[in-house]
Amino acid sequence: MGKIIFITGHVRSGKSKFAVKIAKEEFKNVVFIATGKEIDDEMRERIRKHKESRPEKWKTIEEEIDIENFIGRDNDYIIDCLTTWITNLIIKGYKEKDIIRKVEKLIENIKDANCSAIIISNEVGWGIVPENKLARDFRDIIGIVHQIIAENSDIFYLMVSGIPLKLKGDKYG
């Protein structure tokens, strides 16, 4: 039976590295769904390093908008990352209710496929209140999305400086 594993934490906290470790140890057929775009040299370099950290036999899907449509049986997934996906949706004009619907569809598709999925996201609401409305809306939407994912996850980790803190469920495996 599949599980949803949610890993969140601050930027550069080791979330992706931890997700890859779990998948290497526990998953058979891994599909890595990458939501980032190569918008500049710095992002291109980040993406390159992420690709190098994964086994070559893993399939990678680069998708910015409709990640929920790539979930199917016979595979397990790493989705990296939710905050980038939500950013892409906001930039494309999606409203909060539409984003929440897509997140709920993602969860539904994972459960219907009876696969396991590791969902990675950044914590963004622990800092100062952003000075502009778009940034505040983004922070608020991410907070709501995190609550939905956490509620539906079987296992939930908070990464702090490379250390996974289990907040919900049993260790995978």
Image: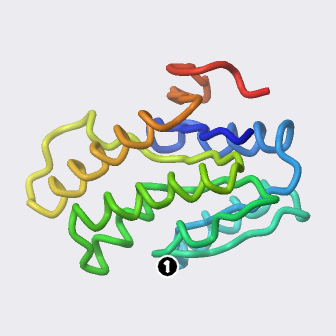
Percent coordinates x, y for residue 157 in the rendering = 55, 28
Residue at 60% x, 63% y: name it.
46
Left or right of residue 10, residue 45 in this image: right
Q: In which quarter of the image is residue 118?
A: top right
Would you call the spot at circle 1 few (<14 residues within 10 Å), some (14-19), or many (20 or more)?
Answer: few
Where 63 falls versus 131 (above or below)? Answer: below
Q: Quadrant of the N terminus?
A: top right
Residue at 49% x, 79% y: name it.
40
Q: Quadrant of residue 74?
A: bottom right
Question: SS at mark 1?
Answer: loop
Q: Mark 1 points at which residue?
A: 40
Where 13 falls versus 33 (above or below)? Answer: above
Percent coordinates x, y for residue 146 in the rendering = 37, 42
Q: Quadrant of the C terminus?
A: top right
Q: Quadrant of residue 26?
A: top right
Left or right of residue 51, residue 64 in this image: left
At label 1, the amino acid type is Asp
Residue at 63% x, 70% y: name it.
70
State the residue in front, 25 or 1.
1
Where 169 falls versus 26 (above or below)? Answer: above
- How many labels sit on residues? 1
